[in-house]
Amino acid sequence: MKNVASVHKEEYGPPPQIIAVAPGIAHILGEHTEYTGGFALPFALNRGMAFAVSQRKDNSLRFYAADYNERKRTSIANIKYKREDRWANYLKGVINAFIGAGYGMRGLDITLTGDVPAGIGLGSSAALTVAAAFGIKNLLGISISERKLIDFALQAENKFMETETGAIETFASCLCRAKEALLLDTHYLEYRYVPFEMKDVKFLITDSQVPRLVADDFAQQREDYQKSLELLGQRRPGATLRDYAPKDIRESIGVLPEILRRRCLHVVEENTRIKEAEEILRARENPAALGKILCRSHESLRDLLEVSCPEIDWLVKRSVETEGVYGARLTGSGFGRCTLTMIREDAIPEYEKRLEEYERIFGFKAITFVCEASEGVKLL
């Protein structure tokens, strides 16, 4: 990540008054449970987005993305979504949320930089909006709750940009702690922290570099699950999907269309896997058991939800064939293109060597990095 303070000063003259950094996130389990009010288990990456800001004397808004060497501008009175503004729309959306809540604003100079890869399911947009919301909060010197901060960040995407997204990544980027994962109940928006360290175990992210071929369709997913509940509710009125056991869903043949039955089975079983993973992580031992849970989760994502692809399946299969690998799965919100692998540190060179075969077969050069559970948004 570039030195955002020096870049900001070089771009605008005065140094930034506030610098906020928010992390990207990865899912251990649970990306596709939110539509049904299920559970999720993300953690914050040791990669993030930095947001530097200083106030202007006029009402102009100037944005500089250092990593793209791109500049955008508008004014407080003319904040609106423009497709050509791409990344700057997230920032405008956050500013608009503060204005809509009654907070007075004048012009701002803003600089962005970061090392969270965009568009691969690692929460880059959540990191961007959380960093912006936290930075503006501190710049204005106002006292708002973490939940309100999260709401402002979500408004930028869901209302200003009209892109329906979930809240898991935003919660995690804001609330996570170092060396811990966040177990989030997406129905009640309650959470607790779970230790995320195991002796001699590393967690490795592999970016498959496969282009995203399927657009995220959160609205359709929610509609499908609502239809499922209506059909299941004929036998158990008022129940939510989290009230069902896997056995109930397996025996729903004839009640649910097969595609809905498979989706519901994934969610119900994933909720169970998250509870099992919590117990293992709290005990801080038995990585082999946690690795098996990751593998079962991937099989479910592949076979029941059908959100994987041959390249990801190859990476998971070959990784677990490597000595020293405990387990692996597809990770990433929506239709992510990464894998999360539990691995002994001494096995990483052999794992990365196998990626040469991946490139020969599929033509994509996979990128890896070791990730550590890090803290949520903070000031520099």
Image (cartoon, rainbow, N blue to C red):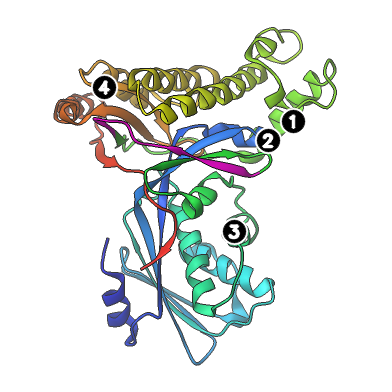
Q: CA distance from mark 4 to mark 2?
A: 35 Å
Disc 3: which residue = 161
Badge 4 crowding class, 10 Å Cα cut-off, few under 14, some 14 to 19, many 20 or more, is: many
Callout 3 amino acid: Met
Residue in the picture at 35% in, 20% down: 286
> At which x and y percent is residue 47?
33, 52
State if disc 3 and disc 4 touch (CB < 8 Å).
no
* Nearest to N terminus: mark 3 or mark 2: 3
> In the image shown, does 177 or 121 lie closer to the viewer?
177
Q: CA distance from mark 2 to mark 1?
A: 6 Å
**Horizontally, is 42 left or right of 350 in the view?**
right
Disc 4: which residue = 325
Callout 4 amino acid: Val
Which stretch did the figure color magenta? 189-202
Q: Which quarter of the figure is the C terminus placed in?
A: bottom left
Disc 1: which residue = 226
User: Is label 4 in a helix, a strand or a loop?
Assistant: strand
Disc 2: which residue = 222
* Nearest to N terminus: mark 4 or mark 1: 1
User: Is label 3 in a helix, a strand or a loop?
Assistant: loop
Q: Decide if residue 298 is in sight here.
A: yes
State if disc 1 and disc 2 touch (CB < 8 Å).
yes
Q: CA distance from mark 3 to mark 2?
A: 19 Å
Q: Is residue 288 above or below residue 216?
A: above
Badge 2 crowding class, 10 Å Cα cut-off, few under 14, some 14 to 19, many 20 or more, is: some
Q: Which quarter of the figure is the N terminus placed in?
A: bottom left
Q: CA distance from mark 4 to mark 3?
A: 41 Å
**Horizontally, is 300 left or right of 324 in the view?**
right
Residue in the picture at 66% in, 14% down: 258
Callout 2 amino acid: Arg
**Horizontally, is 156 left or right of 123 in the view?**
right
Q: CA distance from mark 4 to mark 1?
A: 38 Å
